[in-house]
Image: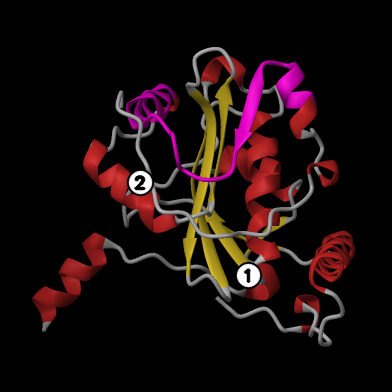
Amino acid sequence: MPAAPMAIQTAEVRAPILTLHRTKAIKEFDKKHILRRVTSAMQSHGPLLPLRSPWSSPIPLPLRHRTSFPTKPLCLAASSSFTVSDGELESRGFRVRRNPGGLDVAALNEVFARVGFPRRDPERLRRALGHAGEAVVWIEELAGGKPVAFARATGDGVFNAVVWDVVVDPSLQGTGLGKAVMERLVADLRATGVSNIALYAEPRVVGFYRLLGFAADPDGVRGMVLSRKNFQKQRKTR
């Protein structure tokens, strides 16, 4: 994996905006995953009413101190559907975490700094993680519990989500941890019915995200970001 997985810094970031492309393979994954969810629910609760499948809907356009966060139930995708399973990661000395509970914010800030991201104010970072809810995936070392890979998403919880802060400790880049957190984050979002998933990426890592199903400017749709420079210029001309 490249040196800096993503660049999401300010309103003036100049990076392609990529959206998850609904390929045939992704649709097949959706169907298999939904069938597993329905089967599990039927075993627990008996027959269910007919469900409308999410793939039939059109895509909308576009611390050192351990921290506790409120959590809510989330249907997580099965580990067997990923390139590297949770069990294989554990055999390599890592554990996958699917919510921000127990995340060492100071240690995460250290990883941000090592990949070239700006250090975040710890209190604001905790608030951001709290707002992300369960849309957080990180990998910790079994020995010590420090985060070595991380990704989160924000959105409306129904239609849209944007992926942020995808990082892997430089000493472990190229070992599949970036793909591991991204596959799980995307699967968890899609399990809740979110169909429009976007992110910002530096040009040198666009290829990494393409392999995960993302596409730049899909169907000619362009992403736009509020520019401080243009915004101030418009205010002066009023």
Q: Which residue is mark 1?
A: 194
For image coordinates 55% across by 71% down, the residue present is 160
Q: Quadrant of residue 122?
A: top left
Q: Residue at x 83, y 70 (%)?
A: 38
Left or right: 106 in relation to 207:
left
Give the labeled residue for mark 2: 9
Q: How many marks?
A: 2
Q: Position of residue 134 (x, y in %)?
A: 52, 54
Residue 180 tag number: none
Labels 1 and 2: the sequence-earlier one: 2
Residue density around tag 1, few if under 14, some if 14–19, many if 20 or more, within 10 Å: many
Disc 2 crowd rating (10 Å Cα; few below 14, some 14-19, many 20+) is few
Q: Secondary structure at mark 2?
A: loop
- CA–CA distance in space, label 1 to label 2: 24 Å
| x, y percent for residue 64 | 30, 23
Residue 59 percent coordinates (x, y):
67, 78
Badge 2 amino acid: Gln
Percent from the top left, x then y, of residue 10?
31, 51
Residue 68 seen from this side: yes
Which amino acid type is shown beneath numbered disc 1? Val
The magenta stretch is 88-114
Residue 49 vertical position relative to residue 112 in the rendered view, above or below? below
